[in-house]
């Protein structure tokens, strides 16, 4: 997606004052005055000089002035400048970050477990919301499909990939097959498609139906729902409740919007899928996020890979006021360790050339 906003040019004094204001605000969560900047961050400049610099930065859109306070707080533009400055040098591991990132990668006894547990570890390590977008199923091959009757006109489709990933979804087949018919359809699909990529399976199922093929004539509606399952990507989310502990996100409307975005998932999956098209770390700050319900937050992601190919993204959602350097380092290192872990999964991932 590229840089959302290119870094504006600031003279050394304005740059120094802006970075000091951001550091003070991130640490204290209180509007920042010129005296605290002079006392704690900037040597050799008087409070009056700093005050004038802060007024200039406000005119330029980097700072804003809360009505109830004499101090100033950073805007999204300021945080973007700060993140771009951090990116001028390679990300440095935060204290304890390597240990936390390593804890985010469980043993390589299964790719699905790795995917499911990583967001929890990210959430625990940042006290924010962790997430991971799993690879699209089309990049793997089928091991088997099982169909189980649930009663009340519903069935459970369980899809197992050749790497051990398991995806399950409740379906509503019409007309309703018997329990034995569901099992038989699952066996037929497994025999027909085992070892084939999901992309090839979807293309085959979407071809015009053969009137002489009993599978198609008996279960066309069910197959259409299975195609939808194969097209989807799992999004693992952990630690949404952590955001309640951040005063910046305490507004009821803000939290309601965030929880709605996490619950509905579709818009977030679309966003993360687009972010996966560009390798490495990406940061969306506040209004840069195209998902309106997430514009009071920052989203930090990094891609994870297998044999040089990007499989998906992982990252965290948190308040705009955060220790960006620490969080970015943790996310980036976790992505590297997940990539390393995937390379050691017992059964190789199937990635079409």
Image: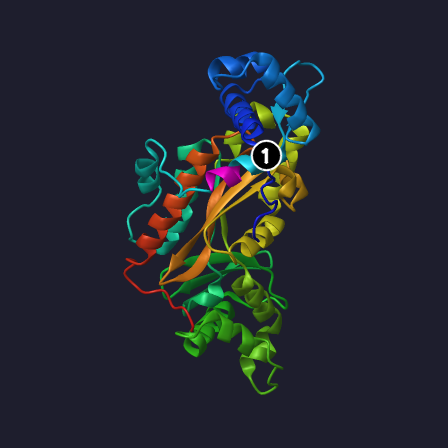
- Decide which of 328, 5 is in the foreground and name it: 5
How far across and down, in percent of the image, does residue 4 sit?
Answer: 60, 47
Q: Is residue 72 above or below residue 308?
A: above
- Magenta residues (range): 83-87
- Which residue of the protein is positioned furthest toward the bottom in this rendering? 212
Left of 140 or right of it: where is 96?
left
Evaluate whether residue 209 shows in this view.
yes
Q: Is residue 163 above or below residue 131?
A: below
x 54%, y 26%: residue? 22
How many numbered markers are drawn? 1
Structural crowding at the residue carrying mark 1, measured as other residues with C-alpha within 10 Å and reported as few (<14), some (14–19) or many (≥20) = few
x 65%, y 37%: residue? 257
Q: Is residue 154 above or below residue 177?
A: above
- Decide which of 11, 294 is in the foreground and name it: 11
How far across and down, in percent of the image, does residue 213 sit?
Answer: 55, 84
Q: Quadrant of the C terminus?
A: bottom left
How far across and down, in percent of the image, does residue 304 sit?
Answer: 41, 53
Q: Is residue 86 magenta?
A: yes
Left of 231 or right of it: where is 72?
right
Evaluate whether residue 317 shows in this view.
no
Quadrant location of residue 262? Answer: top right
* Secondary structure category for the residue under label 1: loop
- Decide which of 192, 337 is in the foreground and name it: 337
Colour setting? rainbow
Q: Is residue 68 magenta?
A: no
- Decide which of 239, 45 is in the foreground and name it: 45
x 58%, y 28%: residue? 14
Magenta segment, prevailing SS (helix, strand or loop): helix
How far across and down, in percent of the image, does residue 289 sit?
Answer: 62, 44
Q: Which residue is mark 1?
A: 10
Quadrant location of residue 35? Answer: top right
């Amino acid at each position: 997606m590229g840089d959302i906003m290119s870094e504006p040019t600031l003279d050394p004094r304005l740059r120094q004052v802006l970075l000091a204001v951001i550091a003070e605000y991130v640490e204290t969560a209180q509007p920042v005055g010129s005296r605290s900047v002079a006392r704690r961050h900037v040597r050799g400049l008087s409070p009056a000089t700093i005050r004038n610099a802060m007024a200039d930065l406000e005119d330029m859109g980097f700072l804003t002035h809360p009505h109830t306070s004499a101090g100033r707080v950073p805007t999204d533009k300021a945080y973007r400048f700060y993140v771009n400055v951090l990116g001028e040098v390679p990300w440095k591991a935060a204290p304890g970050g390597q240990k936390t990132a390593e804890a985010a990668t469980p043993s390589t006894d299964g790719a699905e477990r790795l995917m499911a547990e990583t967001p929890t570890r990210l959430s625990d390590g940042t006290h924010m919301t962790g997430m991971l977008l799993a690879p699209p199923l089309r990049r793997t091959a089928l091991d088997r499909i099982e169909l189980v009757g649930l009663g009340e006109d519903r069935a459970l489709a369980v899809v197992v990939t050749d790497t051990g990933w398991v995806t399950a979804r409740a379906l509503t087949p019409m007309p309703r097959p018997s329990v034995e018919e569901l099992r038989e359809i699952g066996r037929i699909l497994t025999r027909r498609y085992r070892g084939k990529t999901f992309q090839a399976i979807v293309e085959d199922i979407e071809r015009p139906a053969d009137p002489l093929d009993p599978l198609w004539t008996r279960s066309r509606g069910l197959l259409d729902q299975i195609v939808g399952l194969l097209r989807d990507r799992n999004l693992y989310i952990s630690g949404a409740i952590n955001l309640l502990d951040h005063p910046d996100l305490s507004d009821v409307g803000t939290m309601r919007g965030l929880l709605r975005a996490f619950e509905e998932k579709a818009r977030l999956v679309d966003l993360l899928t687009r972010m996966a098209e560009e390798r490495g770390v990406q940061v969306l700050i506040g209004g840069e996020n195209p998902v309106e319900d997430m514009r009071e937050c920052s989203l930090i992601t990094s891609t994870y890979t297998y044999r040089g190919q990007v499989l998906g993204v992982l990252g965290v959602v948190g308040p705009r006021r955060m220790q960006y350097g620490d969080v970015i380092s943790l996310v980036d290192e976790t992505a590297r360790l997940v990539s390393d872990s995937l390379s050691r999964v017992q059964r190789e991932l199937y990635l079409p050339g």
